[in-house]
Image (spheres, rainbow, N blue to C red):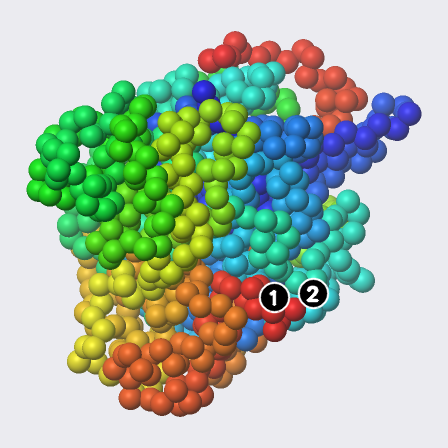
Amino acid sequence: MAVKVAFMQNSDCWGCHQSLLNAHLGLLPVLPALDIVYWPAVVDFKHDSLVARPDGDILVGFVEGSLRTNADVENAKLMRAKCQLIIAFGSCSCYGNVHGLANEWDIEDSIKRKFEQVESITNESPHEPKEHMPGFTNKIVPLDEVISVDVYMAGCPPKPEAIISSVQFLLGQKPQPMADLSFCNDCSLNNENCLLEKYELCFGSITSMGCTLKCTDNGDPCVGCLGPAKTVSSRAEKLKAMTQNIDQLSSGDKKNLHEFLTLFLNVPLMSGFDLAGDILKQVRRTGEPKTALANVPADTGDIYSNILRFLKNHREFIKISTVCDQCDLQIGSKSQMTRVKRDYEGLPNMNDCLIEQGYLCAGPITRAGCGGLCMRVNAPCSGCFGQTAWGVNQAERFADVVTKGFNVALSKEELLAQMKDKLGFSEKFTLATNKNYR
Amino acid sequence: MVKEITVEPVTRLEGHGGLRFVIGDDGKVKDAQFNIASTRFFEKFLEGRYCEHIPRITPRICGICPIPHHLTPTKAVEDAWGVTIPEPARKLRILLQNAKQYSSHALHFYALAAPDFLLGPFADPALRNVVHVISKMPDVGAMALKMMDFGQKLCADIGGKSVHPISAIVGGMKKPMSEASRDKFLAQINEQVEFSKKTVEIGLKVVEDYWDVVANVGVVPTYYLGMTKNGVHDIYEGDIRIVTPDGKKIDYDVHDYLDALGEHIPEHSYATHMYYKPAGYPDGIYRANTLAMINCADKMATPLADGALKAFRDKVGPISHHTFAYHWARLIELVESIEMIATLLQDPDVVNPDCKTLDVQPREGSGVGVTEAPRGLLLYNIWSDAEGICKKANLLVATNHNIAGIEKTLMHVAKQVFEDKALEGLKLPDPWIN
C-alpha cells in the first residue's frame, strides 16, 4: 500500500525538488510506493485540500524553504498538524540558507531596497505591496524554532541519492523481498561458536536468510545486508537484550552497528540525514499506514527502537565528519598560505588543499555529506551542508582550526584581519541560526 | 452579487503564486490578479559580499535555472572590473548554458506542461501530473527522464554541481571538461538529437490537436523582451531586443537597460511588473521567455532549429501573440540547444585548460551582465567598490519579466471564459491518456 507524503515549499528556489527529480530513472521504483497528496510543484492538489485533511493523516511531510513570510510560518504549522513525521528538507529549512544573510539588517531596510530604492523602479511613491500579501517575518529562523522536526536533511540541495535512500528508509523499502526465515537458520556456526553467545553484536537473528557470501563463515558477525526477515529466530531475544545496553558495546561492535545502520536500516549516515527522535515509535503509534518499517516482527521493531534511541542520545556516535574528510585534495601539502587569496586570483593546482594554497575554503567547519563536490572543480567549499559546531563565532573557529591543523603561515589574528566579509564567508548558509543577529 | 474566484496555489509552477478573479453583478470581470507572495531580498543581502562570491549565492534564486544565475553575475562583475575571459572559457559557459536550457525545456514540456494536454483540461486533478504520465506512457516517460538526465549530468560535469553550480569564476572557468567526460557525452549525442526530434513530433501533434485553443484562447498582443546577437537567437550574450506589438524590433546595449526596462511596484504582488519604459505603464507591458525569444529572433543559431522557426512562422506569421504557442516556441529552442551542445562537444576548446585569465583586478564601478535564462531575460547590475566588495545590486530576473504579461493575459482569458463563454464552442481532442 502506498504511503501518503506531502511536500511543502516555503520561500526558496525549487532546487530541492530539482535534486529529487535529478534521481531521474532512480525515481521509478520509489514513485509507486508514494501517495502524493500535496506537492504544488508537480501535482494539482490545492491548499484547501491539505487544510481539509484530518490531523496526522499524512505519514511523511517534507518541508522545504526558508521562513521569510508569515505564510511560510503558517504553512509549517499546518504541515506539523497534518503529518506524522516532518523532514526539514534542505538547508533552507535546516538553517535558513543564504536568505538568512538578510538578518544582518532590519527587515525594513530590505523592504526599502527592494520596493522603494531599486534603480529600475518607476512608481512615483513606491511602497511594499500589501493587498492579499502575507507580510514578512522580521528575521528568518530555522524551521525547528517554529515546529518540532523529526529528520534533518541538510544540503543545498540534498543529494538525490540521499533523498531517495531516506525515502526508502522511511518507507521501509528494501531492494529484496523479506524472506520467511532469518539468517540464523542458514548460519554455519554451531551453538558453541555463536557470536551472539560470545556477546558480539550479530544481527543474523532478524535478517533475511539467503545470502551467498556468509560473513559468519569467516567468523565475522552478520551486519544485515538483506534487511529484515518475516520471522525472527529465538536468538533475537538475546540481541534485544544487548541493544538495551548498547552503551557498553566494544569498539568492534560499534563498527558492526555502523554497518548495520547503513545496510539494514538504510540510514544514509553520512549524507546529512539526522534523526531527531524515535521515528519508529511515531510510525508504529498510529499503526497505519502499514509500511514495511512498521510491519516487521515485534522483536525486530524493538531492536530498531533501542538502536534509534541510542543514536538520539549519543550523537557523538556518528562522528561528525567535515567536508575535508571527503575532499581529495591534500592537507599538509607543499603549498603554504602566506596571505588570504581571493577566489579570482590565479588558478589553484588540483592537488593541494585550497586553504594551503591561500584560499578561503569553509571545508574544515562544514559537515560532510556532499562528497566534496566543489573542490573537484577547484572551487572552495562555501558551507551549504551547515556547520559541525554551533553557537560559536564561525570565522574565529575557522581561523583557529586552520592555523592549528593546516600549513598556514599566518597567525589566527592575521588571518581574521585579512577576511573582509567574515559573515558571508563563514555563515553564508546558517546566519539565520545565529542568535546574535535577531 | 460580486463573486471572487481564487486559485491557491497555482500548481506545476516554479515558485509561489495564486490567482484571484473578481466577477461583478453584471457578470463582467472586474479584476484579475496574479499574486506572487514570496521574495527573499537578494537585492539587499548581496551588499557587503565579496563580488566574486555573488555567483556562489545567487544560484539559490532558482533551482531550475541556477546556471544562468551563476554565469550572469559572473559576467556582471567581469564587466565592472573590465576583465576579458579566454575563448575556451566562453565556449564552456555557452555549453553549460545550453545544457541547462536543454534539461529545463524538457522538464517544462514533460513535467509541467504536458499533463494538461495529454490528459486534457477536464481530467481528474489527482492524475493530471507527470507521475501519472510516466505510468501511462512509460516509453515517453523514460525518454523524458533520459533527456533531463543528460542535460543535468552535463551541467553537473561542467558546473561541478547541477544545482547549484560552482565552476565559473570572475576571469573564466575553474576547470575545463576532461576528454574522457567529453567523449562520454558525445557518445550519447545522436540518441539525444533523436529524442529532441521525437519531442518536436509530439509537440506538433499537440499543437494540431489543440489548434482551436492555440488560435483562439489567450491571444494577447504585448511587447516582447529577448536577446539576440546581431539579430540571431542567443542565450549567452548579445543585445537586449524589444519587439513592439506590431512587430517592430528595437535593440539596446545591455548597459542602457534602464532606458528600456521599467519596474512598476504593484499593490498585490511581491514580484514586480516590468514594462517597456518608452511606452509607459501599463501600455508597455511585455512578455519574455520562449515565445518572446522566438518573436525577437531574425533567425536561430543552428540549422534544425532554424527550419523549425520557419515552420512556426509559416503557421502563425512573423509575430505571434498566441500564449499557447509558448510551448511550441520552447521546442524550437530545445532543438537549438541540443544542436549547440553537439557542436560545442566537438570543439577542442571545451577541453582546453587555458580557461582562466590571471589578469583580474577589482576596480570601482558598475557592471551589467545579461543572459537568457530558460524563463526569460536575466540581468544583473552589480556595483563594486575598489576592493571588489559589492556596494549594491539590482537584479531583473527571468520570471519577473513575465508577471505583468501573465496578469494581462489572465484578464483577457477571464473575459473570454466568464463573459464571452468562449470555451464552450472550442474543439478539444480526445485525451491521449486517461
- Give the residue displayed 88% in from the left and 28% down from the top: B2
Q: Chain of mark 1?
A: A
Name the residue nearer the viewer: B337 or B254.
Answer: B337
Expressed as whole percent of the image width and height from the top left, the position of residue B368 reads 51, 66
Is residue B26 found left or right of A63 in the rendered image? Answer: right
Is residue B67 found left or right of B376 in the rendered image? Answer: left
> In terms of image quadrants, where is residue A294?
top left
**SS for tag 2?**
helix
- Give the residue displayed 51% in from the left and 27% down from the top: A287
Q: Quadrant of the N terminus of chain B?
A: top right
Name the residue nearer the viewer: A310 or A57.
Answer: A310
Q: Chain of mark 2?
A: A
Is residue B352 found left or right of B391 in the rendered image? Answer: left
10 Å neighbourhood of mark 1: few (<14), some, or many (≥20)? many
Placement of B220 over or under B418, stated as above or below: below
- Give the residue displayed 44% in from the left and 68% down from the top: A389
Name the residue nearer the viewer: A128 or B404.
Answer: A128
Expressed as whole percent of the image width and height from the top left, the position of residue A260 reads 28, 43
Residue under circle 2? A107
Residue under circle 1? A102
User: Outermost residue toward the front?
Assistant: A192
Name the residue nearer the viewer: B307 or A133.
Answer: A133
> Do discs 1 and 2 share a chain?
yes
Placement of B6 over or under A354, stated as above or below: above
Callout 1 amino acid: Ala
Expressed as whole percent of the image width and height from the top left, the position of residue A347 reads 26, 73
Expressed as whole percent of the image width and height from the top left, the position of residue B279 reads 70, 51
